[in-house]
Amino acid sequence: MSSELKSPQCWIRPEIQALTAYHVPDPGDSIKLDAMENPYSWPEALVDEWLEVLRDVELNRYPDPGARALTARLRETMQVPDGAQIVLGNGSDELIQMLALAVAQPDRVILSPEPAFVMYRMIAEVAGMCYEGVPLADDFSLDLEAMLHAIDLHQPALVFLAYPNNPTGTLFDSAAIETIIERAPGLVVLDEAYAPFTDASFMPRLDVFPNLLVLRTVSKMGLAGLRLGLLAGAPQWLGEIDKTRLPYNINVLTQASALFALEHKAMLDEQAGLIRSERTRMIQALSSLDGVEAYPSEANFVLFRVREGTADAVFNALREQGVLIKNLNPAAGRLTGCLRVTVGTPDENMQFLTALRNAISPN
Ligand SMILES: *Cc1c(COP(=O)(O)O)cnc(C)c1O
């Protein structure tokens, strides 16, 4: 029947129909500690200076397809080794998608430890690939034996390691990562979205491992609204991956704004420093609460576990008090009972902690 023929059920691929769309809750006017955003705004004078820069942007012209000025600035800011090439993406999410599109074949595997950044699975499925998640150890460290076994078994085209990991905040052991890179038959992508909040990075080691790529973003350092990420690695790989990029994927406003913001990198670094010291305070405060277990974090968020069976109620009680964090309890498995809070300003963090105290011991 023609009505059946013209239906989504007939044409949309089954794996797309099976997906649940990535849901982002409306924060309303609550304190927003759910999405790893930098909580600090810019001084007014700097905003004026930025708006002056935008005045000269020509919206009628296509952007520089190679984003040359921005690329040069990013190479310097992110200390990309001379021998490496970079490709820019509309957020690092787009680069994950480009990587998948470049290697996708129906029987090919994307592999990652779990729990991991949800986009690895989602993009694998959209690209028509298989996704394999390898459980982390109980303390959220890498289970190296299990990873090596899964690599031998599945021969993944891509291995994603978030370094530090989202949603756990864990910084995986670098020796274990090296073993994984050496064992993997395909590419290993170190996703360093949280680089501003840790001293660790594989960027300087790009020259050492021919199958290593490093993914970075400006989102977590304070420019999430711009949508800009970069992938760095050997030119032989990057030249191929770049072919999957849509021309002009970095728009003129992003190019001009990112270039401007990175001229003021010292301010962003200072903000990251504040977030790092608040993180320490936050972990201490959380750990001191009865029935709360906070995990170590090298990122701008803290994962914590509450008393069995109370996570949803605690999350809702926080919402009612005007604080939005991330409830990971529905993800189940090792995240059962877990919530994730982004480190905000000292004031926001205090309000969160007060709300949490109320939520876990209502009287
Ligand atoms: C936030 C995040 C990203 C996405 O970054 P965008 O550049 O904003 O797309 C990628 N990887 C990890 C691990 C993240 O937590």
Image (cartoon, rainbow, N blue to C red):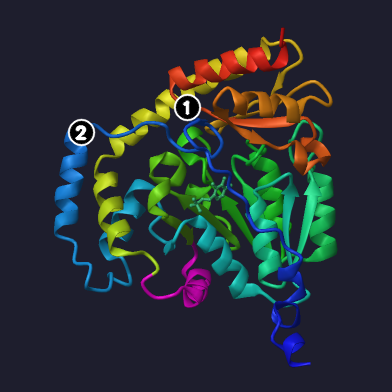
- Residue at 71 percent across and 43 percent down: it is 176
Q: Amino acid at mark 1?
A: Gly
Q: Position of residue 47 (x, y in %)?
A: 21, 40
Name the residue: 40% across, 68% down: 249
- Decide if ligand 1 comes within 8 Å of the CB at mark 2: no
The span picked out in magenta is: 233-248
Count all numbered tags in the image, as a single digit: 2
Inspect the magenta stretch and tell me whether residue 247 lies in it. yes
- Residue corresponding to mark 2: 44
For mark 1, what is the residue? 344
Q: Is 7 located above or below residue 77 in the figure?
A: below
Quadrant placement of the N terminus: bottom right
The tag on residue 67 is none
Secondary structure beneath dot 1 equals loop
Seen from the viewer's position, the closer of residues 355 and 128 is: 355
**Whole-percent x, y for residue 171 in the image:** 63, 36
Residue 24 in picture, x, y percent from top left: 58, 47
Q: Main secondary structure of the magenta part?
A: helix
Q: Which element carries disc 2, helix, strand or loop?
A: helix
Indicate yes or no whether the magenta region holds residue 232: no
Give the class, few, some or many, for how many residues have Cα within 10 Å of label 2's Cα (few <14, many ≥20).
Answer: few
Q: Is residue 155 visible?
A: yes
The answer, for residue 218, to whether it is visible in the render is: no
Q: Amino acid at mark 2?
A: Glu
Q: Is residue 19 left or right of residue 349?
A: right
Badge 1: few (under 14), some or many (20 or more) residues near its Cα, within 10 Å? many
Classify the position of the C terminus by image quarter: top right
Q: Residue furthest bottom?
A: 1
Q: Nearer the viewer, residue 145 or 195?
A: 195
Side (left or right) of 48 relative to 110: left
